[in-house]
Amino acid sequence: MVGEIKICDVVRTFVNPDPREADVVALNGLSLDIKPGKFVSLIGPSGCGKTTLLRLIAGLDAPTRGALLLDEVVIDRPHYERGFVFQSANLFPWLNIRENIAFGLRARHEYREKKETVDELIELVGLKGFEKSFPHQLSGGMCQRVSLARALVGHPKVLLMDEPLGALDAFTRMNMQDEILRIWSEHNMTVVMVTHDVDEAIYLSDQVVVMSPRPAKIETIIDIEMTRPRARNQDDFIRYRTEILEILNFGGEIKTPDYYL
């Protein structure tokens, strides 16, 4: 099996636009091993460096120090073996659904021999019959399905997702979570997802990596030892939710506000 990610003592520093202020340290000596075929969620406070880490794995950014490896090969540039799904679908509005999904294949001059893959993915994500539709004619959930298919068209070893369901309503989001699980199980790839939704992380993941405020370090790694399919009202589910919220300092007693409206 392929798709093993190793993150080795990674530091990522950004230059502060204000020369009077110190540079911003987003990640400070972060190390993490992600086993092949695992579904891993990154969760932590806003601005802690989750997306920065995801972009480094994708090769869209480079570490200031340290190294990232995929199957023992250093990651130093983007590659189709690492598919990326952004928070917004980012589809080309002038291309129809089929053309959006096939874009990567055409860019690599592989469409002619692999065009059947596009048909398979359209059916896999439940968009058969919408091949000639344009993004503005689809719902947000359907556009995210297109984005997911586009990320899968190169048969990646790793699927990276940055809050892919954050803009969707609750019911569409839960349906898409099940779709993502189904596609992951069928493709047998490694998935790393950034989310702020604790329930989503527990529902989807084999492991939840809880990150500290910036400069980010790993607070803890929680193995979700629940069989699938999972129910959000299971005792174990609630126990994991409580544990993660307490690590993030959102547990404890209900506080009474000291003000009046």
Image (tube, rainbow, N blue to C red):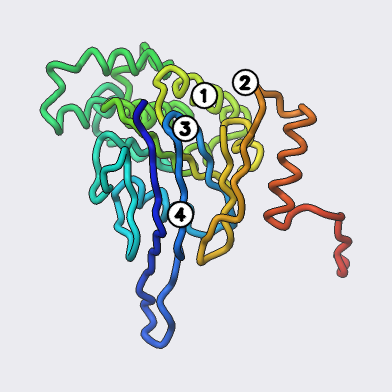
N-term-proximal mark, 4 vs 2? 4
Q: Is residue 204 above or below residue 86?
A: above
User: What's under tag 3, amino acid-wise?
Assistant: Gly
Q: Tell me the mark number nearer the camera, choosing from 3 and 1.
A: 1
Image x and y of residue 47, in percent: 52, 60
The answer to whether the residue labelled 1 contacts the one labelled 2, judged by CB atoms less than 8 Å apart, is yes
Task: Point out which mark residue 140 bears.
Answer: 3
Identify the element where label 4 is drawn: strand
255 above or below 75? below
State yes or no: discs 4 and 3 in contact (Cβ < 8 Å). no
* Mark sitting earlier along the chain (4/3): 4
C-beta proximity under 8 Å, tags 3 and 1: no
Residue at 19% over, 17% down? 114
* Badge nearest the viewer, 1 or 2: 2
Q: Earlier in the sequence, mark 3 or mark 1?
A: 3
Q: Residue furthest front?
A: 72
Q: Earlier in the sequence, mark 2 or mark 3?
A: 3
Please name the amino acid that badge 2 sits on: Arg
Residue under circle 4?
Answer: 31
Measure the C-alpha gap from mark 2 to mark 3. Answer: 27 Å
How dense is the environment of label 1, judged by Cα within 10 Å: few (below 14), some, or many (20 and up)?
A: some
Mark 4 Cα shell of 10 Å, populated few (<14), some (14-19), many (≥20): some
- Amino acid carrying label 4: it is Ser
Q: Which residue is mark 1?
A: 181
- Which kind of residue does numbered mark 1 sit on? Leu
User: Neighbour class for label 3 at 10 Å: few (<14), some, many (≥20)?
Assistant: some
Give the residue pinned by disc 2. Answer: 228
Q: Quadrant of the C terminus?
A: bottom right
Number of other residues with Cα within 10 Å of mark 2, as a class: few under 14, some 14 to 19, many 20 or more: few
